[in-house]
Image (tube, rainbow, N blue to C red):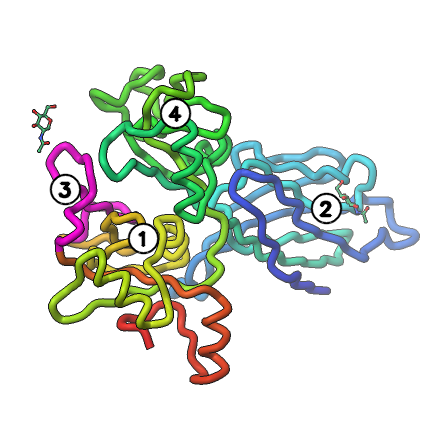
Amino acid sequence: MRKVTHQAISEELSKTVLLPCLFTLRPTTGSSHEPPRIKWTKVWGQRGSDGLQKEQSVLVAKDNVVKKAFQGRVTLPGYSKNRYNASLALTGLRSSDSGLYRCEVVVGINDEQDTVPLEVTGVVFHYRAPHDRYGLSFADAMRVCVENSAVIATPGQLQATFADGFDNCDAGWLSDQTVRYPIQSPRPGCYGDREDSPGVRNYGNRSPDELFDVYCFAKQLQGEVFHSTVPDKLSLATASTHCHSLGAQLATVGQLYLAWQAGLDQCDPGWLADGSVRYPINVPRKNCGGDDPGVRTVYNNPNRTGFPDTMALFDAYCYRGTESCVMRKLIWHQCGNYHGNGV
Ligand SMILES: *[C@@H]1O[C@H](CO)[C@@H](O)[C@H](O)[C@H]1NC(C)=O
Ligand SMILES: *[C@@H]1O[C@H](CO)[C@@H](O)[C@H](O)[C@H]1NC(C)=O
């Protein structure tokens, strides 16, 4: 049996990826011209006590009969032309699609395996203006995303995030000037246009002067985000100075979400560059804001409007770009991903 492992393929949320699977097996001369059997499987997670990882069938094909799982999002685009082309296309990429894909090809008694690691990049987040709920025109919505190391999200990106489990009852602008929000469990005040079935609610195209929140999309972290503090805690201004003293600056909201997606977990509210106070939770636990993983936002009153007073005392989340990170690696041989208290 021949085994090949490809380099990781990385593609953005909601896009389409082609996972290559090329094999050398050919029908043995003399035998009946049996077509190859192709099987794609997703493998992920920690090895259990039996030494095995979780597996999920993605697609099986033989003799032009293709059986698909995976919510109908997979095809073999080269297969109808060439039975020996098993490359797999996966559309509408979700974060949960990240993992290892195995392609097995069987011809007679011979078999070959390819494995392809896939990484789906980028994260969608809800953003509210610092002063008020529903305070952003369409132009403001696009601007605040950019100020937070992101761009306004597309409907496809919000849909992919919904499929990953995102639930948020705040109507937000999207790139096509529509206003939508993702609801997993319908409840009073969040029915929108879909009553009590789960799905993305859509208010349709809106006038650009109307005011809503926004959904932003952050693509990739170009450095590191780390939590830091001092014994007496920090105001917004001293938090900013503190990050500077560590060769960094206050992180933006988009940067914190990307760090959260990469695994940052810290149950300590901290200042960010826009004057908001948030903290990233990957392992939900008591007194850390709810039962689901996510970035928690501290709003300053029961109506969930407005960010804390700038003199209030919290920790800080700092961001250091890749360049200064490379410098530190050269000088101090260190450039960890996430560690408290800077250097
Ligand atoms: C296999 O199919 C894919 C998708 O159509 C195509 O891009 C690729 O070039 C094909 N490869 C070969 C070796 O035919
Ligand atoms: C919350 O909203 C209600 C109704 O709009 C208002 O009466 C109240 O003053 C608000 N509370 C705060 C703390 O802003």
Residue at mark 4 to residue at mark 2: CA–CA distance: 38 Å
Task: Residue under label 3, please give it.
Answer: 300
Q: Where is residue 82 drawn, in percent x and y?
A: 82, 41
- Which of these two is toward me, 119 or 269? 269
Task: Residue under label 2, please give it.
Answer: 86
**Residue located 50% across and 74% down the image:** 326
Task: Give the residue type at disc 1.
Answer: Ala
Mark nearer the N terminus (4 vs 2): 2
Question: Label 4 neighbourhood size at 10 Å, few (<14), some (14-19), many (20+)?
Answer: many
Residue 271 relative to residue 17: left or right: left
Q: Which residues are magenta?
A: 288-312
Q: Main secondary structure of the magenta part?
A: loop
Mark nearer the N terminus (1 vs 2): 2
Residue 89 visible, this angle: yes
Please identify the residue farthest to the bottom as the structure is shown. 332
Residue at mark 4 to residue at mark 3: CA–CA distance: 25 Å
**Where ligand 2 lies, by image quadrant?**
top left
Residue at mark 4 to residue at mark 1: CA–CA distance: 26 Å
Residue at mark 1 to residue at mark 3: CA–CA distance: 17 Å
Q: Is residue 190 above or below residue 252?
A: above
Which marked residue is nearer to the observer: mark 1 or mark 3?
Answer: 1
Q: Quadrant of residue 320?
A: bottom left
Task: Residue under label 1, please give it.
Answer: 273
Question: Label 1 neighbourhood size at 10 Å, few (<14), some (14-19), many (20+)?
Answer: many
Q: Where is residue 64 drawn, in percent x and y?
A: 75, 34
Q: Are marks 1 and 2 in contact (CB under 8 Å)?
A: no
Which marked residue is nearer to the observer: mark 4 or mark 3?
Answer: 3
Which marked residue is nearer to the observer: mark 4 or mark 2?
Answer: 4
Residue at mark 1 to residue at mark 2: CA–CA distance: 47 Å
- Which of these two is toward me, 116 or 24? 116
